Image (spheres, rainbow, N blue to C red):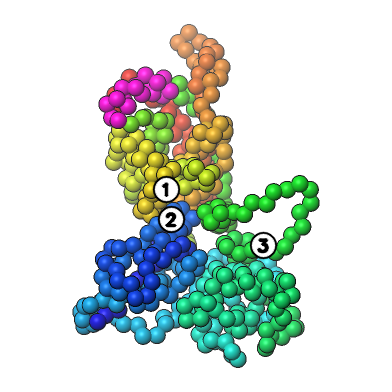
């Protein structure tokens, strides 16, 4: 017999952890190769994790709602293969794990009992605690924000696997502590000290209850859903990571609008799908990225990673109001028909909850159409680890001055604002503005006589 470790899969460059939503298998259950074992969620998409071997579930290492770093072992599968031919060694004791280091922009001071750092997920406890006990990032976030010390965690009874403290356990503990039903745990000093906690852990911790607050006036309190919490965390980290600069321009897209109006019925009849403005915008973006490849890159420390693949993400609104960014892979290798079919297929999958994890991975540049909701322009937040994002506004008819062979005149034209937010660490104003102007020129010079 051999033991195969099932690890949390890599779900994209910017994704460092995932939340476990549901286990479809339990210890002792038989599992086949590629059979779904659990559902997970990130700030981008919900996904299924398939089995990497056929056998029996021997052990599940994390509970529902636990936040697990990418690459960590989440379950073990006992297979019928001889141990000698297995590429995964048998692990007879829990693997000692270390917390993933998170970037800390600044810190706040929280008054709490002075205990070992929360940054170490494996701690040696004393008294009634469990030696080398593991605490998930979610539990540590809740503990830090609620002022629960490491000593209290160590003495806390856990209902999870091997006595681990779950989200439910710590929330119940905090609730009892606030209501006075629970006194201080034995061995916990009453003397307060100062502990520095990373601000992003307190501000963006998912799944914990906020301290009691009194609200005045007539208010309605709405709890954020899981995806909204993850999106909020992703947006805050992006603003902390990249110094954002936004440039604006406008484009006369009259030729493009008139061409689409002329061909849309024939296009749908021949290709079986509708042509929207989005694939036309993406086509222009791709052409300009080829001229200015630096906007199709990412930053790794002091290195600039220029991406040779052009994978365009398109922000898509879901029925619940949240946004998701499916990615058109190798957009530069698709013609307008191919782009249109990809755009419509991904948008339909997003709205109906059928996106796969791979559909949101690998983006190198993002476009968001704020004009869909009537906005003239926007200042979008960069989708990490990318360095630029384009927002296209609503197309409006306006009287504008145009040049003709007979002089200037005023005409009614279809005008649209474009805005580009970019990472000023590597994209300077000259490059950002030049790239944005190039996109506007591509749209303005659209040929009304082209074939689709």
Q: Quadrant of residue 169?
A: bottom right
Residue highlighted by disc 1 = 353
C-alpha span from label 3 to label 1:
30 Å
Label 1 residue SS: loop
Q: Earlier in the sequence, mark 3 or mark 1?
A: 3
The residue sitting at 29% across, 69% down in the picture is 31
C-alpha span from label 1 to label 2:
9 Å
Task: Read off the magenta span.
Answer: 255-272
Residue 172 position in % (x across, y down): 62, 71
Residue highlighted by disc 3 = 210
Label 3 residue SS: loop
- Residues at badges 1 and 2 in contact (C-beta under 8 Å)? yes
Pick the residue in front: 149 or 364.
149
- Report if residue 271 lies within the magenta region: yes
Q: In the displayed structure, would residue 412 be above or below residue 235?
A: above
Q: Earlier in the sequence, mark 1 or mark 2?
A: 2
Answer whether residue 302 is visible to the viewer in this image. yes
The residue sitting at 33% across, 31% down in the picture is 273
Quadrant housing the C terminus: top left
Residue highlighted by disc 2 = 46
Q: Quadrant of residue 40?
A: bottom left
Residue count near mark 3 (Cα–Cα under 10 Å), binned few <14, some 14–19, many ≥20: few
Residue 374 position in % (x across, y down): 56, 31
């Amino acid at each position: 017999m051999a033991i195969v470790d099932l690890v949390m899969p890599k779900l994209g460059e910017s994704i460092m952890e995932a939340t476990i939503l549901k286990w479809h298998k339990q210890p002792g259950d038989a599992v086949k190769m590629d059979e779904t074992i659990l559902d997970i969620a990130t700030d981008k998409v919900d996904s299924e994790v398939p089995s990497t071997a056929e056998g029996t579930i021997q052990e599940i290492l994390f509970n529902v709602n636990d936040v697990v770093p990418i690459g960590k072992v989440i379950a073990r599968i006992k297979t019928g293969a001889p141990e000698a031919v297995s590429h995964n060694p048998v692990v007879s004791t829990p693997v000692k794990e270390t917390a993933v280091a998170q970037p800390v922009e600044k810190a706040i001071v929280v008054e709490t009992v002075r205990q070992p750092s929360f940054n170490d997920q494996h701690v040696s406890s004393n008294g009634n605690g469990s030696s080398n006990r593991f605490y998930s990032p979610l539990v540590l976030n809740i503990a830090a924000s609620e002022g629960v010390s490491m000593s209290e965690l160590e003495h806390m009874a856990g209902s999870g696997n091997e006595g681990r403290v779950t989200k439910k356990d710590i929330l119940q503990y905090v609730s009892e502590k606030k209501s006075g039903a629970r006194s201080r745990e034995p061995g916990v000093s009453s003397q307060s000290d100062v502990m520095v906690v990373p601000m992003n852990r307190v501000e963006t911790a998912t799944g914990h209850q906020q301290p009691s607050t009194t609200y005045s006036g007539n208010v309605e309190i709405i709890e954020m859903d899981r995806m909204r919490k993850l999106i909020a965390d992703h947006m805050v980290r992006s603003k902390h990571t990249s110094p954002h600069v936004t440039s604006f321009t406008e484009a006369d897209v009259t030729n493009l609008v008139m061409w689409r109006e002329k061909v849309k019925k024939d296009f749908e009849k021949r290709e079986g799908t509708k042509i929207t403005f989005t694939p036309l915008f993406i086509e222009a973006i791709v052409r300009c990225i080829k001229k200015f490849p630096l906007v199709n890159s990412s930053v790794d420390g002091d290195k600039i990673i220029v991406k040779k693949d052009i994978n365009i993400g398109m922000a898509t609104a879901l029925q619940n109001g949240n946004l998701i960014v499916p990615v058109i892979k190798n957009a530069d290798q698709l013609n307008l028909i191919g782009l249109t079919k990809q755009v419509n297929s991904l948008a339909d999958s997003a709205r109906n909850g059928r996106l796969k994890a791979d559909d949101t991975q690998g983006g190198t540049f993002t476009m968001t159409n704020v004009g869909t909701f009537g906005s003239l322009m926007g200042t979008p937040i960069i989708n990490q680890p990318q360095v630029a994002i384009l927002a296209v506004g609503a197309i409006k008819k306006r009287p504008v001055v145009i040049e003709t062979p007979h002089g200037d005149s005023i005409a009614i034209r279809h005008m649209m604002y474009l805005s580009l937010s970019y990472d000023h660490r590597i994209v300077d104003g000259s490059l950002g503005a030049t790239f944005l102007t190039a996109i506007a020129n591509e749209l303005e010079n659209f040929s009304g006589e082209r074939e689709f």
